[in-house]
Structures are given as structure tokens and as C-alpha cells.
Amino acid sequence: PNFHTVLQNDRPADELLLHEICFRCDDSSLKELNHIKQDMSRALAIGFHPLTVDGWTNVLHEAGYEVKRSETGPMKVLNPVTVLQDEGPKRAARIAWNIATDASIRSRVVETRRAIKSHQHDLGYILIRAVANNGQALN
């Protein structure tokens, strides 16, 4: 399910904790944002639709949530140190083995790293804590 489907659940959550990809710029250059979306969608072979910080706040507000806290920072996806920290040594070794021995995986990883690196100043992560406005979250 996509993010909007989750927000429209029959039983909305009283509190949401999100960790998502965001644009680290404003909406002023829609042409550039669309270029980044297209490039990342090609590299990842999926639809890629991050929002700006204001965009995430607005989506949550429209769904009946109030953002209580948010934090943003640079993306560190496919960084070997981050993979080791996130996955642990055993899974990180398996991921490295799969990349080393499977040309199609290696090609996807190289293309994804290229796309992320080329847009590293425009993309990042956002952590959000939002609470329902007095039980008014959409349902």
C-alpha cells in the first residue's frame, strides 16, 4: 500500500512515526524536482515520489495529523558502513556476496549509487513524529 492508503486506514493511528525520503529543497523548481524523480525512478525501477518537508507536513495535516517533531539529514543508502550498521555483519556479508557474484544485482546497485550520488544535495531522509488532531485523523 502507498502512504495515502495507510493514512486512510479504517483505524487511524493516534501517533505516526515516519522515516521517509524527502527533497532537501523547496518546491520552487518543479522542473528540477521532476527531473530528479525521473532519474531516480529509472535507477530504482520503481515509482519514486518523495516530498519536500513542507509537502510531508501538508499531507499529514490534510489527513488530520499534527507534526510534533521532524528531523532531516543526508541519505546514506548503499554506503558500506551504513549497510553494516543497519544490517549487521552477517546480512551485510550476504549482500556483498550477492553484489559480487550476480551481474544484474551489481548493475542495479551501481546505477542506484550513481543516481543517489548525483542528487545527494537534493535528497535526504526525514523523520517525523505526528499525532492525530483530537481523534480527527481521516478514516
Image: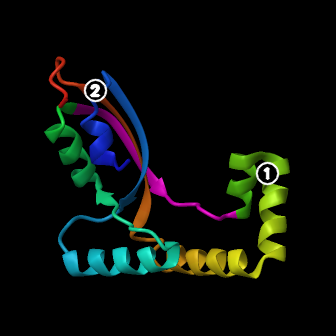
Instruction: Give neighbour class at mark 2: few <14, some 14-19, many 20+ (Cα, 10 Å).
Output: some
Of marks 2 and 1, the one in the foreground: 2
Amino acid type shown at disc 2: Pro
Residue 112 placement (x, y as % from top left) = 57, 75
Judging by the rendered image, the residue that carries numbered circle 2 is: 12
Label 2 – label 1 distance at C-alpha:
34 Å
Give the quadrant of residue 98: bottom right
Left or right: residue 117 versus residue 28 is right
Instruction: Give neighbour class at mark 1: few <14, some 14-19, many 20+ (Cα, 10 Å).
Output: few
User: Residue 84 versus residue 1: which sits nearer the camera?
Assistant: 1
Give the quadrant of residue 138: top left
Q: Which residue shows up at 73% across the image and 62% down it?
A: 80
For residue 37, above or below residue 123: below
* 21 in magenta: no
Query: Do the CB atoms of the residues marked 2 and 1 lie less than 8 Å apart?
Result: no
Residue 3 placement (x, y as % from top left) = 33, 47
Amino acid type shown at disc 1: Arg
Residue 9 placement (x, y as % from top left) = 28, 33
Secondary structure at badge 1 equals helix
Identify the main secondary structure in magenta: strand
Q: Which residue shows up at 29% across the image and 24% down it?
A: 11
Left or right: residue 96 versus residue 54 is right
Q: Which residue shows up at 49% across the image and 74% down it?
A: 45
User: Residue 28 versus residue 50: which sits nearer the camera?
Assistant: 50
Residue 91's mark? 1
Work out which residue is located at the far top of the displayed protein and give it: 134
Sequence-earlier tag: 2 or 1: 2
User: Residue 139 versus residue 123: which sits nearer the camera?
Assistant: 139
Residue 107 placement (x, y as % from top left) = 67, 82
- Bounds of the magenta segment: 66-79
Secondary structure at badge 2 equals loop
Q: Which residue shows up at 39% across the image and 70% down it?
A: 122
